[in-house]
Image (cartoon, rainbow, N blue to C red):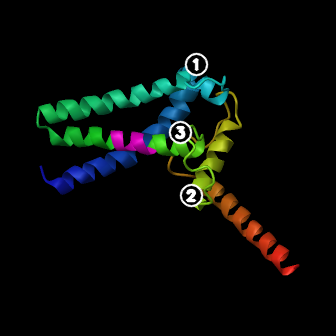
Amino acid sequence: MNIFLFILIVLSMFIFMEVVTWFTHKYIMHGFLWYLHKDHHQPSGTVFQKNDAFFLIFAIPSWLCIMLGLQAKNYPVAAIGFGIALYGLGYFIVHEVIIHQRFKWFTRSNNTYVRTIRWAHKMHHKHLEKEDGESFGMLWVAKKYWQKIRADKKRNKQRQELATSAY
């Protein structure tokens, strides 16, 4: 298999997984599997949550595609599995490390994208029940959250300029 086609499939699957994540989050996690996702919105203070089971729900198809695809030399199937796994890594970094800070690696980032995804997720978590949610994706963030963060940054910059010019 051509390496460029393999990479194209991996990257395409990575992008497609954002759509899958949005759909799964909105209609399955906030639907019939709410009993697994509920403790993510209403944390109990434990290290692990029932919500962490979704890791396996996404990891198993990835692992099977990689394993079976490589065993059968069906490289497009393996590429699909690698795309899912790559998205899983991105999800872990964004959701667990950057947003919820389960690992204290990026706690003081002032990056616009980081602040935007954190704000969008905060707006998602303001809803403690499964209804009336918003911002169900992970890596793609709606325009209104970008506008809010940019306006905040502009306002903060103006305040700093006023404060320094007053001296």
Q: Which residue is mark 2?
A: 113
Q: Name the mark nearer the viewer: 1 or 2.
A: 2
Secondary element type, mark 1: helix
Answer whether residue 87 is magenta in the image.
yes
Whether residue 137 is visible: no
Secondary element type, mark 2: helix
Give coordinates of residue 74: x percent, y percent.
Answer: 14, 38
**Which quadrant does the C terminus fall into?**
bottom right
For marks 3 and 1 on the same chain, the one whose residue lies earlier in the sequence: 1
The stretch in magenta equals 85-90
Q: Nearer the viewer, residue 85 or 135?
A: 85
Secondary element type, mark 3: helix
Q: Which disc number belongs to residue 96?
A: 3
Instruction: For label 3, count other residues whose C-alpha is less than 10 Å away and answer few (under 14), some (14-19) or many (20+).
Output: some
In this view, the residue farthest toward the right is 166
The answer to whether marks 1 and 2 mark residues whose Cβ atoms lie closer than 8 Å is no
Distance from label 1 to label 2 (Cα)?
Answer: 31 Å
Give coordinates of residue 36: x percent, y percent.
Answer: 55, 21
Instruction: For label 1, count other residues whose C-alpha is less than 10 Å away and answer few (under 14), some (14-19) or many (20+).
Output: some
Tell me where residue 40 sits by quadrant: top right
In this view, the residue farthest toward the top is 35
Q: Nearer the viewer, residue 114 or 131?
A: 114
Whether residue 82 is visible: yes
Q: Nearer the viewer, residue 98 or 77?
A: 98
For marks 3 and 2 on the same chain, the one whose residue lies earlier in the sequence: 3
Q: Which disc number belongs to residue 35?
A: 1
Q: Which disc number belongs to residue 153?
A: none
Distance from label 3 to label 2 (Cα)?
Answer: 16 Å
For marks 1 and 2 on the same chain, the one whose residue lies earlier in the sequence: 1
Three-letter amino acid code of the residue under disc 3: Glu
Three-letter amino acid code of the residue under disc 1: Tyr
